[in-house]
Amino acid sequence: MELTDKARLIEEKLPSLYRQLQICHLCPRRCEANRLAGETGYCGAGEDMVVYTAFLHHGEEPGISGERGSGTIFFSGCNLKCVYCQNFRFSHTLEGSKVSSEDLARIMVRLQEKGAENINLVTPTHFLPWVMDGLAKAFRNGLTLRIVYNTSGYETEETVVLLGDAVDVYLADMRYITPSLAERYSQAADYPAVNQKALRKMYDQKIPVWEGPLLKQGLVIRHLVLPGCVEETMKVLTWVSGNTPQALISLMFQYQPYFKASHYPEINRRVDEGEYERLMDFLDELDLEGWAQDLLPEEDLAGVHFVPSLEGLI
């Protein structure tokens, strides 16, 4: 699809997207906040888009980061509020810079100028009207990179349909299969049902397409392994194998008990070697492509270490 056609298709959706800000249904919480009147929903977002930081990220999956890094934009706020969130500094608050759609378009184009392999939008759904507006402007101003939609996976099917013309790669979490775990750690008992519908819709949209070592189109399903939850991870992997077998799996062992995890004794520790080995053996039995992290995490790019800066990008 030509980039001008992408821009036009996005622009046709903008009026209805901006109207949603008056009765917000952008995410499954469906708070119905009138954000244009100063109300805020569960995510904390109101009438302004807020970005915490943006940079060339070398810590994503190899098919996303490539050699030059993914042009990653971290949006503030989130609709899940996980108790173990490593990005709590900005995901549980709106710390960051207020950014217009014009500013966002400039950030994208400048990340491209710096050599980014793609544009990677991290947790953007609660700012979707401005994000889509910024994408259309960026496409009209010379952006040619692939678009990665980096999401917690807590998305409505309607949102996924809206994104279909704009997004090339979905980088989506599958955090839980069991509603009680989703409620305990992310205050979203409906997460499994909502997540599975969204992932199926993403999968139907984007068959995997590679250009050398880089993923140019497709669905990557991320799963963060929680300590004591080996069976839950096995259920996730089994679901992926049975429902989205061509999706790429990204099995993550970087969990550390950040934020409020110390209040939950069962997850107040790292995943141990025995759990790691059991899951790697189980993964070997499945016919899935993708990546699995080593047990020791790369902490230098964890959200707790990100610097809130848009210097040189606006």
Image: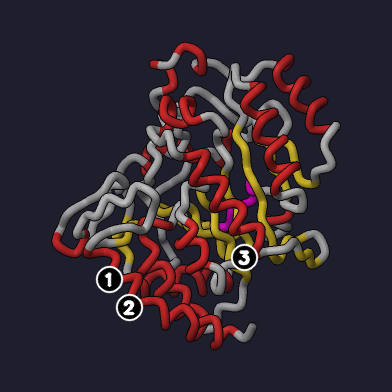
How busy is the neighbourhood of tag 3: few (under 14 within 10 Å), some, or many (20 plus)?
Answer: many
Q: Amino acid at mark 1?
A: Arg
Q: Are marks 3 and 1 in contact (CB under 8 Å)?
A: no
Q: Earlier in the sequence, mark 2 or mark 3?
A: 2
Q: Quadrant of residue 240?
A: top right
Q: Is residue 146 visible?
A: yes
Q: Are marks 2 and 3 in contact (CB under 8 Å)?
A: no
Q: Is residue 225 above or below residue 243?
A: above
Query: Can you give x and y, in whole percent of width and height, for residue 144 in the image?
Result: 61, 78
Residue 18 part of the magenta segment? no
Query: Can you give x and y, in whole percent of width and height, for residue 243 in the image?
Result: 70, 47
Image quadrant where one finds the C terminus = bottom left
Residue in view at x 66 percent, y 22 percent:
231
Task: Provide the residue span drawn in magenta.
Answer: 56-60
Secondary structure mostly taken by the magenta-highlighted segment of the chain? loop
Task: Give the Cα separation between the discs numbered 3 and 1.
Answer: 29 Å
Query: Can you give x and y, in whole percent of width and height, for residue 270 in the image?
Result: 59, 19
For mark 2, give the secondary structure. Answer: helix
Query: Can you give x and y, in whole percent of width and height, for residue 152 in the image?
Result: 50, 46
Q: Nearer the viewer, residue 156 or 130?
A: 156
Disc number for residue 118 = 3
Q: Amino acid at mark 2?
A: Pro
For mark 3, give the secondary structure. Answer: strand
Disc number for residue 19 = 1
- Residue wearing tag 2: 15
Residue in view at x 58 percent, y 49 percent:
172
Task: Give the Cα separation between the discs numbered 2 and 1.
Answer: 6 Å
Q: Left or right: 118 with respect to 88?
A: right
Q: Left or right: 244 with respect to 189?
A: right
